[in-house]
Image (cartoon, rainbow, N blue to C red):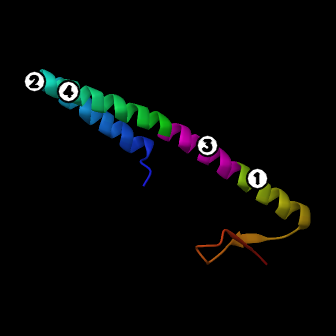
Amino acid sequence: MVPSSALCRAQETLHRHRAADTRLENVRIVETTAAMAWGREAEAAERRERRQKKATGIVADAIDDIANADGIELMLSENPDRAMATL
């Protein structure tokens, strides 16, 4: 499972709050380190989500171009393991 950027940001915030609320130095160090790790993971997730959004847009544009050029009507397939079906 790949965590979303929202989940990573929530975990980062949680660990930052825990670090701020404790009086124990070792807990503060661990929680701050965990928050930084979740922040790095959130940045990676945001990059991954941008790439996926861009790729989805490129595929949708290509499908539209093919459908418009050939006059083919495309619809979603009722089979979940198939992307598109033609009539």
Sort mark 3 into few (<14), some (14-19) or many (20+) by Cα contacts within 10 Å: few
Disc 1 + disc 2, Cβ < 8 Å: no
Percent position of residue 36, x then y = 34, 28
Residue receiving disc 4: 19
Q: Quadrant of residue 65?
A: bottom right
Which residue range is magenta in the image? 45-57
The verdict on residue 7 being magenta is: no
The verdict on residue 46 being magenta is: yes
Residue occupying image coordinates x 61% and y 46%:
53
Disc 2 + disc 3, Cβ < 8 Å: no
Type of residue at label 1? Asp
Is 60 above or below relative to 10?
A: below
Which element is circle 4 on? helix
Residue receiving disc 2: 24
Q: Which of the pair 74/8 is nearer the observer?
A: 8
- Position of the C terminus, as image quadrant, is bottom right
Residue receiving disc 3: 51
Residues under labels 1 and 4: Cα distance? 47 Å
Percent position of residue 26, x then y = 15, 25
Percent position of residue 70, x then y = 90, 66
Residue depth check, mark 1 versus mark 3: number of the one nearer the observer: 3
- Chief SS of the magenta region: helix
Residue receiving disc 1: 61
Which element is circle 3 on? helix
Residues under labels 1 and 2: Cα distance? 55 Å
Residues under labels 2 and 3: Cα distance? 41 Å
